Image: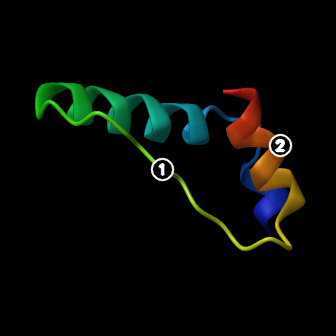
Amino acid sequence: MDEDYRRMGVGNFLIDSSVNLANKNRCFRIRPESDNKRKDAHKFYKKI
């Protein structure tokens, strides 16, 4: 099921929205987290 929703831009949209919200609120760090077993998620976060 997860594969059906990949590469549609949703992850990038969520990260961009998070960064914009953080900038608006003068946050200095965003720290996405996922289980160590989720290798694809880690690759995604490193890529962006």
- Residue 17, picture quadrant: top left
Closer to the camera, 27 or 1? Answer: 27
The quadrant of the image that shows the C terminus is top right
**Discs 2/1, front:** 1
Q: What element carries label 2?
A: helix
Relative placement, left or right, of 46 versus 38 is left
- Residue that badge 2 annotates: 43
Crowd band around label 2 with a 10 angstrom C-alpha radius: few (<14), some (14–19), many (20+): few
Q: Do the residues labelled 2 and 1 touch (CB within 8 Å)?
A: no
Closer to the camera, 11 or 39? Answer: 39
The structure residue drawn at horizontal position 53% and vertical position 53%, both measured from the top left corner, is 32
The structure residue drawn at horizontal position 72% and vertical position 74%, both measured from the top left corner, is 35
The three-letter code of the residue at mark 2 reads: Lys
Marking on residue 41: none
Q: Position of residue 23 (x, y in %)?
A: 22, 25
The three-letter code of the residue at mark 1 reads: Arg
Relative placement, left or right, of 31 versus 9 is left
